[in-house]
Amino acid sequence: MPAALPATGAWRPGDPVGRRRFATVAVDRPFVLEGGGQLRSISVAYETWGELAPDAGNAVLVCHALTGDSHAAGGAGPGHAAPGWWDGLIGPGRALDTDRWFVVCANVLGGCQGSTGPASPVSGDPDARPYGSAFPVVSVRDMVRTQVAVARDLGVDRWLCVVGGSMGGMQVLEWGVMFPERVRSLVPIATSAAASAQQIAFGSAGRKAIRLDPRWRGGDYYDALPGEGPAEGLALARSIAQITYRSDDVFTDRFGREVVEPLDGFSLWQRFQVERYLEYHGAKLARRFDANSYLCLTKAMDLHDLARGRGGLREALARISAPTLIMGISSDTLYPTYQQRQLCELLAGGGCASEYVEIDSRHGHDGFLLELDQVGAALSPFLAGVEKSEHR
């Protein structure tokens, strides 16, 4: 692991703002979290593309996945370490056509790219110390509640559509259940109604990799010098996750059994090319993400359960009245297509207009980030139909 890796890759006050705008929540009162914790003066970083119609009827909310952020479109530059994670889908003439739609993406609560999270300064602390280990557990429902502040600031009473994949899809579903009157349509992709045992197992393994890194320091590492933070634990957590994001076919075709160091006599630490690939992605994430945010957000994903406190899954889904386009990915082993099919069947059985589309991809779970032609081909006509019905 290169010694130059920062203690945290979080965006922090004083860093270049880039395209970010900020909404605030709970300035004059505590924001009580689903799990019982509290926060004050929450900041929500968000970005927009396109122009909001006079009636605010063309607003589309894009929800990001685990290591995404508000920079869904646009190039890398000051304030943005990487190009937009859905750049090929958002823009003039693209599926989310910014000549037609007003597209919004917010960094989630607990994230590390401008929204309040573990790396953020504690509200009211004169020394601006980061929350670190004191940051409370948040849920997907808490994330959605803070996104309401973004809609408020923009003057959007009802989203034309809320769309997102993986953890983003969890937010989409919670928008439909929590605020059915504020969404005109929903597009959850490669997600589930509740985290499965296997999904929880992978999340738990990643969190333990960070916890066992001695440089994690119980979560209070923000004053560490470069190379002295929990980058190794975060990189290992990313490696574990990366294995679940791609299919066996893709790994085999790309790497096979190719080696980095020649096998002239064996040692424990000779590497195969696939190992170097995982190391590369681990270090790449450590440069732009925060270990505590990784802990926080993977826990929120494990806690995801639409049925919790609502009398059961059917009862929860009965609250969704908006037309829903659900997408699955044929080779996804992390969020298998049976989970999306079940969602579609339950919604349709409850009288909701629900459609299932399967993305044909060899890439596994990451297909929703890579198969943009197929995602766009399903999304564009769906949005057009929603807009048409809105103006009847």
Image (tube, rainbow, N blue to C red):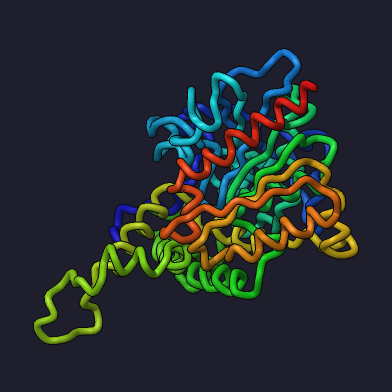
Q: Identify the residue shown where x is 74% and y is 48%.
A: 354
Give the side of residue 172 with respect to residue 119, left or right: right
As drawn, the residue found furthest toward the top would be 54
For residue 295, what is the image quadrant? bottom right
Q: Position of residue 300 (x, y in %)?
A: 66, 59
As drawn, the residue found furthest toward the left would be 264
Give the side of residue 173 with respect to residue 93, left or right: right
Q: Position of residue 41 (x, y in %)?
A: 72, 37
Give whichever of 34, 321 is nearer the camera: 321
Q: Position of residue 166 (x, y in %)?
A: 59, 54
For residue 108, what is the image quadrant? top right
Give whichever of 103, 128 is nearer the camera: 103
Give the side of residue 356 with respect to residue 376, left or right: right
Q: Identify the residue shown where x is 42% and y is 62%.
A: 246
Q: Would you say residue 127 is visible in this rendering? A: no
Q: Identify the residue shown where x is 47% and y is 28%.
A: 18
Give the side of residue 377 with respect to residue 264, left or right: right
Q: Position of residue 47 (x, y in %)?
A: 57, 30
- Quadrant containing the N terminus in the rendered view: bottom left
Q: Would you say residue 149 is visible in this rendering? A: yes
- Quadrant containing the C terminus in the rendered view: top right
For residue 138, what is the image quadrant? bottom right
Q: Identify the residue shown where x is 73% and y is 30%.
A: 151
Does residue 290 sit above or below 17 in this rendering?
A: below
Give whichever of 128, 7 is nearer the camera: 7
The number of numbered discs placed on residues in the rendered structure image is: 0
Does residue 382 sit above or below 93 in this rendering?
A: below
